Amino acid sequence: MMRLCITRVLTATLNLWMMIGAAFAGADAAAGVDPTFPGEHWQTKRPDEVGLDQTRLDAAARLAGGRGCVVRYGYLVYIWGDHTKASDVASACKPFYSHLLFEAIEDGKLAGPDEKVIRWQPVLGGLNRSLGYKDRQMTFRHLAYQTACLGFEEAPGTAYDYNDATMGFFWDTLVNKVYGVEWKDAYAKLFGPKFVEPLQMEDGFGFPTSGPKAGRPGISPRDFARFGLLYLNEGRWRDRQILASELARKAVSEPLPLSIPRTRARPAETCHPRSIGGGGNQCDHNGGYSWLWWLNRPARDGKHWFVDAPHDMFMALGHGGRRGVAVMPGLQLIVSWNDAKELHVDRELGNRVLGAFSRAAGRR
């Protein structure tokens, strides 16, 4: 209770400080703001100093619920709730693994995303004889697009199966086989050097090393915003190109075509991988799934998933949108949250929330 009271006081104090002087700021307050990167700690500015409307930010945060923060031009400009608490982000962590996939390609560990997985997982060779040994054709692209169809009748690449058991198979293959790192060492050898240290994450990085959720990190909203900022800057962090810009752009710009159907979920032989969360066939891609990121693209009804949010927005989302980070490149805006309402599966609510945050930046 004491921690909660202190958090509320600190949140109110910081937001109040961000508002001081707002009455003296002109309409073009954001003009001339030099984009930056956080160091050990975030640099802060008032919302009006970066062209954001405090009232609209307040309304968006109340509607979203939970806790989170807003970053613009690399400055922390708005918070609600405890934005420093590191906790599980569920499936919103999946883009960390497409990042690791692309780094493995850059480093020559893989020939490319279309390399066959059977090289690393020979067990695939004996599965589904009656289906023409379909799993022998599985590639890393299929795993990173959730079109591997492991355990279902469709051939890899022919249907979308949002499947947390297949995701566990992907993580184990990538980390344990391709990188050659055991889970007990994965933080020290992979996640620390590739994410926590270069991005100077400041709130800890929960990292299970055993059990079904091994490799499913916990992260605070303000640290998750750093990962979003990395991709906003196309893989660059300060003067270091952490991931090649063409690969960072690729990750958030190549959605599955609507011609790829959702799996019919007819069971087939599998190798019984661990699930990192739920089951299979959890949702459709709706034309907005790119290398484990979600994009705001036209869905099967012909409308953008979030019609009132920027069409260039990309997101990492978990637990139906209760946890995530949204990056709006055209606005240089990042919104990061946890313990919120279901801002993805509740399409109407998510549209209201993310549309409100973008309107705070003057988008009409």
Image (cartoon, rainbow, N blue to C red):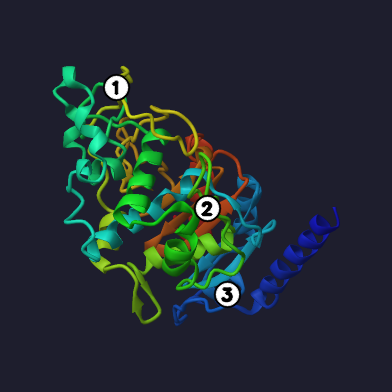
Nearer to us in this view, 203 or 187: 187
> Looking at the picture, does residue 26 appear above or below residue 294?
below
Q: Amino acid at mark 1?
A: Glu
What residue is rendered at 36% in x and 35% in y?
Answer: 166
Front tag of 2 and 3: 2
Q: CA distance from mark 2 to mark 3?
A: 21 Å
Q: Which residue is mark 2?
A: 217
- Numbered mark located on residue 42 in the image: 3
Q: CA distance from mark 3 to mark 1?
A: 49 Å
Which x, y percent locates residue 230?
A: 40, 67
Q: Upstream in the sequence, badge 3 or badge 1?
A: 3
Q: Upstream in the sequence, badge 1 or badge 2?
A: 2
Q: Which residue is mark 1?
A: 269
Q: Amino acid at mark 2?
A: Pro
Q: Amino acid at mark 3?
A: Trp
Q: Upstream in the sequence, badge 2 or badge 3?
A: 3
Residue 280 in sight from this viewpoint: yes
Q: Secondary structure at mark 2?
A: loop
Front tag of 1 and 2: 1
> Looking at the picture, does residue 73 appear above or below residue 56?
below
What residue is rendered at 34% in x and 37% in y?
Answer: 303
Name the quadrant containing residue 24.
bottom right
Which x, y percent locates residue 192?
A: 48, 66
Number of labels in the image equals: 3
